[in-house]
Structure formats: C-alpha cells, structure tokens
Image (cartoon, rainbow, N blue to C red):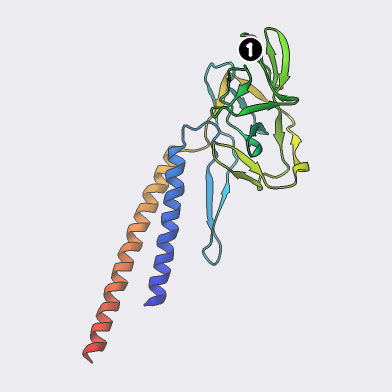
C-alpha cells in the first residue's frame, strides 16, 4: 500500500505544480512580450521548467515609443544587477527624456541610453530612432545562438547565464513602431489544461482516499486476527 500511496502522492504534486504554471500563464495573458513556461519531469520526478520563446502577435498601441520585435532578438535593459534582456517593448520617456521601460529601467541603444529631445519621434524597422528628423540613436537588439541559458528574472526581464561573448546583434532586425508584442499564451488552451489538471487532481485525491481506506481495513482485519 505504501508504494501505491507514494506514487499517487507524487502524481498529485505534479498536478499541483502544473496548476501553478497554468495559473501564472493566465495571469500574464495581457503582459507584453510574456513567454510561457514548459514544465517537465525527469525519471525521479524532479521538475524542470524551460521557456517557450515563440513569438506573440503584435498588438497596435499607437504609442510612438512602443516597439515590437520580429522573430529574432531582445531589447537590452540597464538594471542595478547589470544588463538584462526583454521582449517587452512598452517604453516611455523619463524626466531626462531617456527611453525607459515600465519599471523606469533604461533601455539601451548601441551607444548606451538613448535621449530623445524632441516630440516628433520615429523609429524605423532597423531600430534607428529619429527625433524631429534627426537620428539620436538606435535600439540595441541582442541575440544568442541558443536561448536555453536565458532565465526569467522578474519584471519580464531575462538574464543570460552563458558566456557574455555569445551575445550578438540580431540579424535581421525588424522593429515595429506603435505596437507591442503580445504574450504567446492561448487562453483557450490554458483553460483546457486547467480543467484537465483539476480533474486529474480530483481523481488522484479519490485514489489516495481509497488506498487509505483499504489500508485501514487491512490493519483492522490484521488486528482482529
């Protein structure tokens, strides 16, 4: 009985972890540039989470500082922990008229933070930024040969745990002004997974109760003998 109970408990824990991942996905369906997690288990049931970097659909915002990327690349963000990477192109200007993200972190251009002095802002497909007709910088768009070492770090940023020399400039670059990349979450798919996970968890709980009852009956019978 102990082996059966252990297996059922492990299955229940897997469903709980899956439910947590699905809940996080549903909470971030409207988060610009959000990438869904992929949960897997090895032979000893150790959980591993990887990131699905498939591209979300661009959503028109009309904000001249909002930018979406094509299939390749990440914007570079200056944080207190060092340079980080993001697909979230929901940008604005701080009081110094530097381009920042929603957390107030500086977005880097090829020559560092970008200052936009004028009001007429144009960003072309190459990421070149023009203010009142004068180029004031170009968005730095980084890329890596493999995304397996890009790890989520909060604020929709990623850190790269590989060799810094792996970083290259994305080629080709495609920047879409006035749009942001949506999450790559399908609400219908996640809701379906949540229902399936909930049903599976209920089945496992019922199984564990049955095993516990049978074990109790066996103990009672053994005591009677």
Look at 61% across and 40% down and name the residue there: 158
Q: Which residue is mark 1?
A: 121
Q: Nearer the viewer, residue 95 or 218?
A: 95
Q: Residues within 10 Å of mark 1 (few under 14, many from 20)?
A: some
Q: In the rendered view, would you say 65 is above or below 195? A: above
Q: Nearer the viewer, residue 83 or 19?
A: 83
Q: In the rendered view, would you say 218 is above or below 160? A: below
Look at 64% across and 29% down and name the residue there: 70
Look at 68% across and 47% down and name the residue there: 161
Residue 27 position within the rendered picture, expressed as x and y whole percent measured from the top left: 43, 38
Under circle 1, the secondary element is strand
Q: Which of the 4 image quarters holds residue 133?
A: top right
- 212 with respect to 19 (left or right): left
Q: Which of the 4 image quarters holds residue 125?
A: top right
- 97 with respect to 22 (left or right): right
Residue 44 position within the rendered picture, expressed as x and y whole percent measured from the top left: 54, 67
Q: In the rendered view, would you say 136 is above or below 211? A: above
Q: Quadrant of the N terminus?
A: bottom left
State the residue lying farthest toward the right.
165
């Amino acid at each position: 009985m102990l082996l059966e109970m252990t297996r059922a408990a492990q299955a229940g824990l897997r469903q709980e972890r899956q439910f947590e991942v699905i809940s996080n996905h549903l909470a971030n369906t409207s988060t610009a540039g959000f990438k869904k997690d992929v949960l897997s288990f090895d032979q000893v049931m150790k959980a591993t989470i990887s990131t699905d970097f498939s591209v979300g659909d661009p959503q028109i915002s009309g904000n001249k500082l909002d930018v979406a990327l094509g299939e390749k690349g990440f914007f570079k963000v200056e944080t207190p922990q060092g340079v980080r990477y993001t697909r979230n192109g929901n940008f604005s200007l701080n009081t110094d008229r530097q381009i920042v993200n929603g957390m107030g972190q500086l977005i880097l251009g090829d020559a560092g933070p970008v200052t936009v002095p004028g009001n007429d802002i144009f960003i072309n497909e190459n990421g070149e930024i023009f203010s009142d007709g004068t180029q004031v910088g170009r968005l730095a768009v980084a890329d890596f040969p493999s995304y397996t070492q890009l790890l989520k770090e909060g604020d929709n940023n990623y850190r790269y745990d590989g060799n810094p020399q792996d970083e290259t400039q994305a080629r080709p670059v495609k920047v879409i002004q006035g749009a942001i990349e949506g999450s790559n979450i399908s609400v219908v798919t996640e809701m379906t997974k949540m229902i399936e996970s909930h049903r599976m968890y209920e089945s496992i709980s019922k199984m564990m109760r049955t095993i516990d009852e049978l074990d109790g009956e066996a103990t009672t019978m053994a005591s009677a003998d």
